[in-house]
Image (cartoon, rainbow, N blue to C red):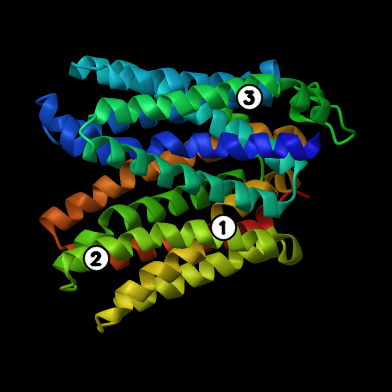
Amino acid sequence: MVSLLLAVIYLAFISLGLPDALLGSAWPVMQGELNLPISFAGVVSMVVSGCTILSSLLSDRMTRKMGAGLVTALSVLMTAAALFGFSISTKPWMLIAWSIPYGLGAGAVDAALNNYVALHYSSRHMSWLHCMWGVGTTISPFIMSMALQRGWGWQTGYRSVSYIQVALTAILFLSLPLWKKRTETPEGTESETGEKPKRLGQLLRIPGASLTLLTFFGYCAMETTAGLWASSYLVSARGVEAGTAARFASLYYLGITLGRFLNGFIADRFGDRNMIRAGLGLALVSILVILLPWRICPLIGLVTMGVGSAPIYPCIIHSTPESFGRENSQAIIGVQMASAYIGSTFMPPVFGLIAQYGSIGAYPVYLMGFALLMIGAYGVFMKRGKRG
């Protein structure tokens, strides 16, 4: 039964990644058909991100009341409905309206699943599960691309992914008894401690909590900025041909996905903290390689930066119950998710302003700032911030 539940959670992580790449792959066509300015995609993305941050912060209360399994099932159902809503949208306000359940569902399922896996499974499964998120973000653009190439329209692409989400929702509801059996193990869960949910101020006063939030903020700011602006930097600052630049920008994300798959084989042996240190070190070295003058260096650096980034996010999450106690893990992970989304939402546009009014050549320096922030925050956490 435990292995069957794990398979269901793998599917849930794929479903978490499915919607994330749809807007970007569909927007060039959506924008023209709906007669919207190209910048309106940023408005939609901001609404989704804002609702995701809100539901992440509320995830502790929801999970204590309903359990991780039901929160996950309802959240995937919300995203399925939102994606179908996108497919029938003909006005800007409709896209905004459907972005609300989209974001609320994404944040709740992300925090609930991450905490559940951190409590009940080993570090290797956390790495593999985040690899499954990468699978989801790879599948959905392929579906959208096929719909557009065959003349079915972006609406069919959204609708197709929504149908997949509906099927996954049905599987999740059918699996609810498995979640209940798992939480009845002697390990206990966050809802069995009998404690009331902590407020944000109480969580931030827990030793080391703010340091992990800085680490998450820095990681997602670095990852999202690196992926969004890689092609532009390679073409404009380093003279790389556009097709080659796009290919290596995609290899950055492939490096993260494959890195997490490989990390699963060694994470339990080396431990979360050693994996995090190694990932931070490789990410920093990779950024230094990007700075080197030879044209091949930024291409190599992007790929190795993806591999270095791979263990940081899943290993910090997996170590959260150990660092802050099982009774605090759901609330802490919810705030970590919120901090991560703040970094991924606001920091890439900030670099866009730097590129527009300054120089896009500042790309590796900007990334290095976040790498150093992570190294500093996590280093201090390891010295004095961890529990006990």
Q: Residues within 10 Å of mark 1 (few under 14, many from 20)?
A: many
- In front: label 1 or label 3: 3
Q: Residues within 10 Å of mark 3 (few under 14, many from 20)?
A: many
Q: Quadrant of residue 177?
A: top right
SS for dot 2: helix
- Vertical position of residue 162 compared to residue 365: above or below: above
Q: Which residue is mark 2?
A: 245
User: Looking at the image, which residue is at 39% across and 38% down?
Assistant: 20
**Residue 342 in view, yes or no:** yes
**Residue 374 in view, yes or no:** no
- Vertical position of residue 284 compared to residue 79: above or below: below
Whole-Å distance between the Cαs marked 3 and 2? 40 Å
Q: Is residue 346 left or right of residue 2?
A: left
In the image, 280 versus 182, the foreground residue is 182
In the image, 178 versus 298, the foreground residue is 178
User: Looking at the image, which residue is at 78% across and 30% down?
Assistant: 189
Hey, what amino acid is under mark 2? Ala
Q: Which residue is mark 1?
A: 260
SS for dot 3: helix
Q: Which residue is mark 3?
A: 172
Assign the N terminus to one quadrant of the image: top right
Image spot of residue 216 (x, y percent): 50, 48
